[in-house]
Image (cartoon, rainbow, N blue to C red):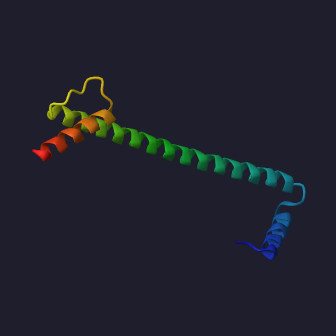
């Protein structure tokens, strides 16, 4: 982290190098650069979140297919049933088989 003396030294050097007429222009350019950098960061974060959403959706779809396949293999009617209903039917069937 830069302290006050370092910042003052940097400002003096910039003032000597570019002159007082160029300082507002440099400040605007610096501000625009910082804004573009922050926008790019937000795009990366947004892209990462979208990727996670896609991966989660794909994982859920894969899980749903496996549950549907398992229910079918167990002889459970899968027509017009939600995944939650199928899971309950599978559990009930497993419990009834364990009691035998």
* Image position of 3 with respect to 35: above or below: below
The N terminus lies in which quarter of the figure?
Answer: bottom right
In this orientation, which residue lies closer to the viewer: 9 or 21? 9
- Relative placement, left or right, of 89 versus 6 is left
Point 40% across, 43% down: residue: 56
Q: Position of residue 11 (x, y in %)?
A: 83, 67
* Image position of 51 with respect to 26: above or below: above
In this orientation, which residue lies closer to the viewer: 79 or 51? 79
Give the residue furthest to the front.
Answer: 99
In this orientation, which residue lies closer to the viewer: 66 or 7? 66
Give the residue furthest to the bottom.
Answer: 5
Give the residue furthest to the right.
Answer: 20
Give the residue furthest to the top.
Answer: 80
The C terminus lies in which quarter of the figure?
Answer: top left
Q: Position of residue 80 (x, y in %)?
A: 30, 23
- Relative placement, left or right, of 14 versus 99 is right
Point 83% across, 51% down: residue: 25
Point 49% across, 41% down: residue: 50
Q: Position of residue 63 (x, y in %)?
A: 30, 40
Point 76% across, 51% down: residue: 31
Q: Position of residue 73 (x, y in %)?
A: 15, 34
Q: Quadrant of residue 68?
A: top left
Number of marks present in the image shown: 0
């Amino acid at each position: 982290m830069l302290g006050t003396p370092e910042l003052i030294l940097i400002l003096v050097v910039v003032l000597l190098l570019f002159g007082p007429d160029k300082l507002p222009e440099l400040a605007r350019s610096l501000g625009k650069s910082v804004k573009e950098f922050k926008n790019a960061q937000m795009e990366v974060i947004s892209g990462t979140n979208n990727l996670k959403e896609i991966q989660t959706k794909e994982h859920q779809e894969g899980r749903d297919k496996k549950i549907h396949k398992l229910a079918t293999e167990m002889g459970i009617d899968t027509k017009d049933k939600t995944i939650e209903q199928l899971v309950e039917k599978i559990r009930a069937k497993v419990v009834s088989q364990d009691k035998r």
